[in-house]
Amino acid sequence: MRRNGFINVLIWTLVILLIVGLTYGVFTLFNGVKYPDEDDPIVIPKDPVITATMEGYTVYKLSEISFPFVIARVTFESEEAMFFDISDLITSEQLSLAQTQVYQDDLLSNGLFLSYQMVEFELPRNKKSFSINLFIPVKNPDAQKITVTTRFKSDIKLEFDLSFVQGVKEMLGYVEDDPTVITDNDKYKLKILGLEDLTNTTIMQRLSDGESEQAEFSSQARVIGVKLLIEPLGGKIVTLKDSRLKLKDGTVIALALDSSYFIEGYVSTLDHQFQSIEESYLIFDIYSDTQELLNMALILEIKFEGEDDWITILINE
């Protein structure tokens, strides 16, 4: 009897120990989860923060076209490399800045060129900072303001007051009919400022050692200068490589002297890299009566670096 009692006590003891063990295990399982604290915070990934800073803008309302528009200089910055497209920029009129071709075509057909303001239609990628000139057409000609935001979540909101109009068509390369102005509306604009008799002007020649001396010409020679104003467009650099002077019947009377010849204070047009608007001279050594040439109808032909075709300009026409 005592033996059975001992066995019962042992069984109940084991049962109690088992229950206690299970209870402790369950308690440990559900209470052993480590919650975040100040020493071990959970970091939730966030989208990169992109900021847009307005550097300046110009509002255009031109009589030649039916819509106003803005050209804005904007700087985008982020702590991480940016990968968004110009199609992600959208106006308050729900126009994506990637869908402006019809407006661009309208400008082109009226002799207005966005390249003069260095407008771009693609955003740089994989950069933390960049600046760009944006073309922002406005559908409603009576609108007083317009806003540009993004398709994705951001704090970017660029607002433009359309009542302050400063843009004029000449800022977009508009050229009145002028036979002395030549432009391809892309790389250059060129204007003939006149023909000059340089026979009694000091012409210098740059030597191979870098020194310069006064150039010597035959006593029968007449030196003619064609003074030009050359303006590169859209931030480009242009170089004029060759030039010749013809009579109206096509007879070549002289080739321009090479770039070693120059007038003090002026650049020689040939081989000079024009990075901004500059006056320069094409110099021709001619065996003919000077005064007669200055009053004759002549043809000036020039060729820019990288171009195969001659550009023809009429003088004294």
Image (tube, rainbow, N blue to C red):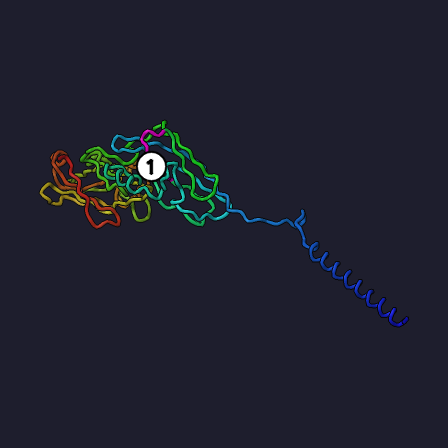
- Relative image position of residue 242 (x, y in whole percent): 22, 47
Name which residue lies at 15% across and 37% down: 315
Q: Residue furthest left?
A: 249
- Residue 218 in view here: no
The foreground one among 2 and 233 is 2
Report whether 161 appears left or right of 197: right
* Residue 93 counted in the magenta span: no
Q: Residue furthest top?
A: 163
- Relative image position of residue 249 (x, y in whole percent): 9, 43
Q: Residue furthest front?
A: 1
Give the residue type at disc 1. Pro
Report whether 7 appears left or right of 277: right
- Relative image position of residue 269 (x, y in whole percent): 26, 42
Q: Which residues are magenta?
A: 133-143
The foreground one among 263 and 21 is 21
The residue where tag 1 is placed is: 137
- Residue 64 in view here: yes
Q: How many marks?
A: 1
State which quadrant residue 220 falls in. top left
The foreground one among 235 and 156 is 156
The foreground one among 176 and 3 is 3
In the rendered view of the protein, which quadrant contains the C terminus? Answer: top left
Name which residue lies at 35% across and 44% down: 98
In the rendered view of the protein, which quadrant contains the N terminus? Answer: bottom right
SS type, badge 1? strand
